[in-house]
Image: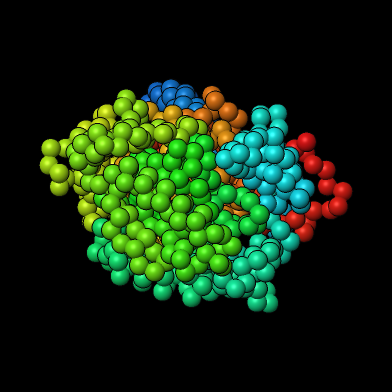
């Protein structure tokens, strides 16, 4: 009985240690966050089991020795039964020691797999399965400098303060690159990006005392002076109510050159002529936008406007627009197509934008025709409309203004447009639904002819045309060429005409619906990782690889807008689908800078971008551009292969960011991971006068 009891104790010790070793091995494959939670426990438990095992082993072997020695003291030889028992126990002890060695191997293997390298953790953030935010990522707002910026394998230094408003591809101030190009047709205002050897390898600083922008909709009317410290427009446009300087803020009364009483009243005047409230007008284009008040006030009617203007003497007008939370970008109508697909906008607008519409064989108005949706409207106010009332104030002769209006009227007719309204300072034309009747009209007006054989969606560095972009053929004169789009808000989830027609190879109605549901699920996951995401903290967002627009669509009716960019060499050109969903965006090659000012986006989403571009350009150049356009305390959400993400993480941690990696929504076994990076607050105020310029 005693022998059996001791053997039982010994086997208990072996069993306990074996169980712990197997448990450690199994946990090596468990989600890493759960392993981290049990790490401290595992540091204690093996010692407990080891002591228990040694106790059981020592106890069992001690009993054997006591029984044998007792027999010898009594002068008796060991009994055969006791001797046999001892031999049996020696065999058992050998077996137990072998088993102990085996389970110890399991234990150390499990502990090794479950451990992390402290040195590597500085360069790589391990994936987390948790849905909440890491305590290390603080999404609250700050206005002071950050301490304890972590180091990485490569650290990027700040640029000189003079680069605070650097726009690499539209630079006329620092490198003066653009000034090497012709001024005729404003070619020098187009995109002219730096060569590889000219790229800055430093971080663009925010201006001293930079302050987090006011939240929407307060930002529509007010912004902080320190963020865009330019008062030029407050003087130049004083009587037009563009912008007013008030203490530490700028006030935007909503005025414009042709609507000094405010954009709201001006839009009401347009609404009296064409219905802006029934959902058939959703996307709009504002050419020569100023500070984009027209686009900003259209937002109140659920109309999403893309506003653009060149970087010119009206200093920072696009920067003001984005500071206000209004979609805008730097662009100019010159010799290249606008970076948008064909049939994108329900309405285009020019309010004294000073674009020479009838010159250069009408290429500027022909380009507006390309991007207008069938049945879309072109609105013109300012010269030469209503010239009889304004010619003296415009300092132009009646003959000159009449000639200009006649040229525009003639060109619009040759484009097959119909003038539907002219009232006061407003003139409105409408593009035809299709080209059935236009083809007949070309017998009378052969120029400009209808293009043949060209891809109307191709727009990246593509020259403008002197021919009319053809619309897809339809038999019924009442049907839109390319197919009708649904009214807003149904348009957001309705299957776009480009997919219904089969013009996007491999993208079916079923795949589109699956993609929509996929991104709804992913946004739910994002909002758990970043709680402020669903509460309006981040107004200006960018999706660097928008695909079918699922990310933006999943944000639904949150108080945000998304600049959906599509690489021009993507396998499938999906930007047209993005617009058919009632969203906006642009083509963008991410080996170059985006046409915007620094610090103009709150959140940048990048899905698969680094895998796409890793063999084409340097990953740090893409990250430096992302850093340029995101605001202090802004956020990156980067999805990619885990191996690529580890490279990205090592770089971004050297750019003054806090980072954390998360597992895929479907769990840790999926190789695609999610990297969150939050930009640390810092400004040019922290730089000394002797800071070198590492980009030169």
Percent of width and height locating residue 158? 74, 46
Q: Nearer the viewer, residue 207 or 158?
A: 207
Tell whether 98 sits left or right of 418. Answer: right
Percent of width and height locating residue 344? 35, 46
Indicate whether 166 appears above or below 387. above
Q: Nearer the viewer, residue 413 or 314?
A: 413
Which residue is located at x 36 percent, y 47 percent?
410
Q: Quadrant of the C terminus?
A: top right
Q: Quadrant of residue 633?
A: bottom right
Colour scheme in the image?
A: rainbow
Which residue is located at x 22 percent, y 42 percent?
434
Q: Is residue 518 visible?
A: no
Q: Quadrant of residue 369?
A: top left
Indicate whether 136 appears above or below 102. below
Which residue is located at x 31 percent, y 33 percent?
446
Which residue is located at x 48 percent, y 75 percent?
261
Q: Quadrant of the N terminus?
A: top left
* Outermost residue, front side: 399
Percent of width and height locating residue 83? 43, 24
Tell whether 606 sits left or right of 148. Answer: left
Q: Is residue 354 visible?
A: yes
Indicate whether 595 appears above or below 573. below
């Amino acid at each position: 009985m005693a022998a059996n009891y001791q053997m039982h104790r010994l086997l208990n010790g072996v069993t306990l240690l074996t169980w712990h070793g197997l448990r450690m091995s199994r946990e090596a494959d468990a989600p890493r966050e759960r392993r981290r939670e049990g790490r401290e426990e595992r540091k204690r438990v093996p010692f407990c089991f080891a002591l228990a095992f040694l106790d059981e082993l020592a106890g069992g072997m001690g009993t054997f020795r006591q029984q044998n020695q007792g027999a010898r003291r009594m002068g008796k030889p060991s009994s055969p039964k006791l001797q046999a028992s001892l031999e049996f126990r020696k065999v058992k002890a050998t077996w137990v020691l072998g088993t102990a060695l085996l389970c110890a191997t399991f234990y150390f293997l499990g502990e090794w797999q479950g451990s992390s390298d402290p040195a590597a953790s500085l360069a790589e953030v391990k994936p987390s399965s948790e849905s909440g935010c890491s305590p290390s990522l603080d999404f609250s707002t700050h206005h002071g400098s950050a301490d304890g910026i972590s180091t990485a394998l490569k650290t990027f230094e700040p640029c000189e303060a003079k680069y605070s408003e650097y726009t690499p591809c539209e630079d006329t101030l620092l490198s003066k690159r653009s000034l090497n190009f012709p001024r005729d047709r404003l070619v020098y205002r187009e995109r002219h990006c730096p060569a590889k050897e000219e790229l800055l390898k430093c971080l663009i600083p925010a201006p001293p005392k930079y302050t987090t922008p006011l939240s929407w909709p307060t930002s529509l009317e007010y912004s902080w002076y320190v963020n865009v410290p330019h008062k030029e427009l407050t003087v130049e446009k004083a009587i037009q109510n563009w912008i007013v300087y008030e203490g530490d803020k700028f006030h935007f009364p909503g005025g414009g050159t042709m609507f000094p009483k405010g954009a709201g009243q001006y839009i009401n005047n347009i609404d009296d002529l064409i219905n802006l409230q029934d959902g058939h007008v959703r996307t709009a284009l504002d050419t020569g936008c100023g500070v984009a008040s027209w686009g900003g006030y259209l937002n109140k009617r659920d109309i999403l406007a893309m506003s653009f203007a060149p970087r010119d003497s009206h200093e920072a007008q696009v920067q003001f627009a984005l500071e206000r939370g209004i979609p805008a970008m730097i662009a100019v109508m010159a010799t290249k197509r606008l970076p948008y697909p064909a049939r994108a906008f329900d309405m285009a607008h020019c309010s004294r934008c000073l674009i020479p519409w009838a010159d250069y064989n009408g290429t500027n108005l022909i380009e507006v025709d390309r991007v207008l949706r069938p049945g879309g409207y072109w609105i013109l106010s300012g010269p030469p409309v209503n010239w009889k009332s304004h010619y003296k104030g415009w300092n132009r002769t009646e003959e000159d203004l009449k000639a200009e209006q006649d040229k525009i009227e003639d060109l619009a007719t040759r484009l097959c447009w119909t003038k539907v309204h002219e009232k006061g300072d407003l003139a409105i034309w409408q593009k035809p639904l299709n080209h059935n009747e236009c083809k007949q009209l070309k017998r009378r007006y052969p120029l400009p002819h209808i293009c043949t054989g060209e891809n109307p969606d191709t727009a990246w560095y593509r020259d403008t045309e002197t021919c009319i972009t053809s619309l897809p053929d339809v038999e019924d004169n009442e049907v839109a060429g390319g197919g009708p789009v649904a009214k807003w808000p149904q348009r957001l989830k309705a299957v776009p005409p480009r997919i219904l027609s089969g013009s996007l190879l491999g993208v079916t109605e079923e795949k589109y619906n699956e993609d929509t549901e996929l991104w709804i699920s992913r946004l739910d996951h994002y909002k758990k990782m970043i709680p402020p995401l669903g509460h309006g903290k981040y107004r200006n967002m960018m999706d660097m690889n928008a695909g079918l627009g699922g990310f933006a669509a999943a944000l639904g009716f949150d108080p945000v807008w998304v600049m959906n960019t599509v690489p021009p060499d993507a396998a499938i050109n999906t930007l047209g689908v993005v617009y058919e969903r009632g969203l906006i965006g642009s083509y963008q090659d991410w080996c170059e800078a985006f046409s915007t000012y620094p610090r103009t986006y709150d959140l940048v989403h990048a899905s698969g971008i680094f895998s796409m571009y890793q063999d084409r350009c340097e990953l740090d150049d893409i990250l430096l551009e992302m850093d340029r356009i995101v605001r202090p305390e802004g956020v990156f959400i980067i999805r990619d292969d885990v191996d690529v993400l580890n490279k990205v993480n090592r770089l971004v941690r050297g750019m003054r960011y806090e980072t954390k990696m998360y597992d895929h929504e479907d769990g840790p076994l999926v190789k695609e991971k999610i990297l969150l990076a939050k930009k640390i607050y810092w400004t040019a105020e922290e730089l000394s006068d002797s800071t070198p310029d590492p980009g030169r």
